[in-house]
Amino acid sequence: MALARIIWVDDEIESLRSQQLFLENKGYAVQTFNNGFEAIDYVRENPVDVVLIDESMPGITGLETLAKIKEINRSIPVVLITKNETENLMDDAIGSQISDYLIKPVNPNQVLLSLKKIIDNKRLVAEKTTSAYQQQFRHLFTALNSDPDHKEWRDIYKKLVYWELEMQRTDSPEMEEVLQSQKTEANTEFFKFISRHYASWIQVASDTTPTMSHTLLKRKVFPLLKKGTPVFFVLIDNLRFDQWKAIEPILSASFRLTEEDSFYSILPTATQYARNSMFAGLLPTEIEKKFPAFWKNDEEEGGKNLHEEELLRAQLRDAGLGDIRFSYTKVLNNQSGQELQQQIHNLMGNDLNVIVYNFVDILSHARTEMEVLKELAGDEKSYRSVTRSWFEHSPLHQALRRVADKPLTLVLATDHGSVRVKTPARVIGDKQTTTNLRYKHGRNLQYEPRDVLAFRDPRQAGLPSPTINSSYIFAKGDLFLCYPNNYNHYANYYRNTFQHGGVSLEEMIVPVITLQSR
């Protein structure tokens, strides 16, 4: 069986007979044509793996032949062979989606190398990726067991995401399993790290503590307001670091990346807590004390994030920025997204524009309830793919493209991430205990201590105490918390869903990205 089926189109094909024989001796099946019309007819009726086309032919040119072949099958790789190195020709060729081009005169080894690049690319990439990860495995293992600080943990997670993205290009379930095992181990160690240090971060925020939800704007956004260009702060709710990497190429086409950073979401890693803290520049217990009308506990009726603009205004005033011009826009549906797209030029006169976009969080929750979304976003790889597809075609992307040619700074961030939960853990509580799967608070909570990070005094975690003797617990790793009532039903229903609120790398270490217009 031939390694691949090749057609070679050249008006002087007889002079290339030796090259044809060379490729056939290497195991390729080569069909030759001296004009584009015959090649087009052949492609229409026969399977072809790669097409080699001479650019300059009488009757129908190589580029014209290429266009007709792509109309028949866009996925066929095409190698253009040419004497002409002009910029316009190369632009036309690349625009026609060639896979490679060769400059005449070509020797057999050049052609062979091009074919190997195209045909064996996936296999070669897989082999190289697997080999590179095997070399890095021990370094990551050593890093995990060297008592990393909060900066090193961010680097570790970034490396794990990098290898996860690299592995998705391979077809090696065995290596993917090894990586997932290492991620699980990393989350186990990360949980221990957070258990040891989180309370101290909360009690005293200093230059040595990590940037967290309540210090994010002060550290990463407000300093940019002094540079004289408008700042767009775009918060995509529930965007994990790997999802940022999925949409990065799309944004990079319009904006120049200047800083790729991450910060720690506060606990619980849930919108009500993390996002209110971000806009207030305060911990939840401080918000409740300073703005009691703006804070609602989990069990209280009504929206929990209805006063973000007022909280932001107060934080700006406290930071000495009360005189700046700013806007706040929350996009909850496609209609408001379209309105943002139409009106974004009007925001260029402001110093700061805050845009909150809720789609990814909606997707995460809808996936739990809808079978069709469970199929579309069944695992991390497909979850990233759905996120990328949404962003590419979203009103948000279109809106940002409209102002990409204007001088501005774009800061992209989120409030928290999510983790795919796999392992149920039993919790017993009273009627006032919250229903969230990754954290709970209430009185008389009963649980397995090794499964959770517990704060019997909520103030240690900067959290309000809804009732006397309230305590908070946060699930570790991929655990989700279930009550004994109808336990098996809920354990099966929520297994492999994406949830947030607890302690994991995916939920707590989240992106904050700075970009500039080109």
Image: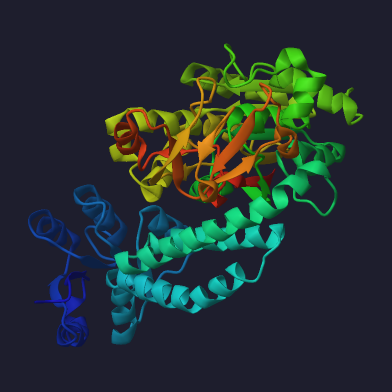
Q: Position of residue 277 (x, y in %)?
A: 72, 31
**Residue 329: quadrant of the picture:** top right
On screen, 98 above or below 115?
above
- The x and y percentages for residue 259 are 69, 52
How many numbered circles does the render carry? 0
Does 178 appear above or below 150? below
Residue 103 to residue 500: above or below: below
Q: Is residue 76 visible?
A: yes
312 vs 64, nearest the viewer: 312
**Where does the image place residue 433, in percent across and percent down from the top left?**
53, 25
Which residue is pictured at 75% across the width and 21% down the height?
Answer: 288
Q: Is residue 450 above or below residue 174?
A: above
Q: Nearer the viewer, residue 74 or 431?
A: 431
Name the quadrant containing residue 265: top right
> Position of 429 compared to 296: left or right?
left
Q: Residue at x 31, y 72 (%)?
A: 123
Q: How is the image coloured?
A: rainbow
Q: Quadrant of the N terminus?
A: bottom left
Image point 28% across, 85% down: which residue? 108
In the rendered structure, the answer to whether residue 132 lies left or right of residue 69 reads right
**Front one among 127 and 145:** 145
Left or right of residue 493: residue 129: right
* Residue occupying the far right of the picture: 320
Instruction: Give the left or right position of residue 393, taking residue 411 as reference.
Output: left
Q: Position of residue 305 (x, y in %)?
A: 63, 20
